[in-house]
Image (cartoon, rainbow, N blue to C red):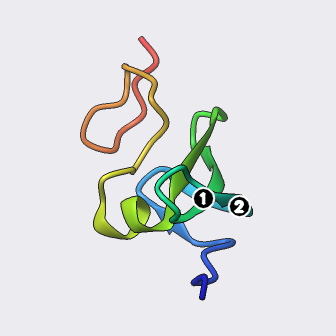
Amino acid sequence: MTIDEIGKTYGLLTVLEHVGKAPNGRAAFLCVCACGKTRVTTGRRLRQGDAFACTHKGHRNGEINNK
């Protein structure tokens, strides 16, 4: 059973769509960051707070810093 995460926001990430399963078998979701970049991550990582932004190194503590 997959939890419906579409439309939910976690930190700077908003879930766009379910994209299948990650290599570990967990549900994978395509997310868009507030800065516009996309990232695929699992619902578990989103819910636990392990994934809160894209992998852009300018993000610190959930804030956008593109400098």
Image x and y of residue 23, in percent: 53, 49
Determine contact: label 2, label 1, CB under 8 Å. Answer: yes
Q: Between 66 and 41, which is closer to the camera in this rendering? A: 41
Q: Amino acid at mark 1?
A: Ala
- Residue under circle 2? 20
Q: Secondary structure at mark 1?
A: strand
First-in-chain label (2 vs 1): 2
The residue shown at (64%, 32%) is 37
Furthest toward the left, the residue is 61
Q: Between 37 and 25, which is closer to the camera in this rendering? A: 25
- Residue under circle 1? 28
**Considering only vertical position in the picture, is 65 above or below 1?**
above
**Considering only vertical position in the picture, is 56 above or below 67?**
below
Screen quadrant of the C terminus:
top left
With 27 as the anchor, is 48 left or right in this view? left
Q: Between 47 and 64, which is closer to the camera in this rendering? A: 47
Image x and y of residue 34, in percent: 57, 43
Image x and y of residue 25, in percent: 52, 63
Find residue 63 and report its image quarter: top left
The residue shown at (67%, 71%) is 7
Neighbourhood count class around disc 1 (C-alpha, 10 Å): few under 14, some 14–19, many 20 upward = many
Residue 57 tag number:
none
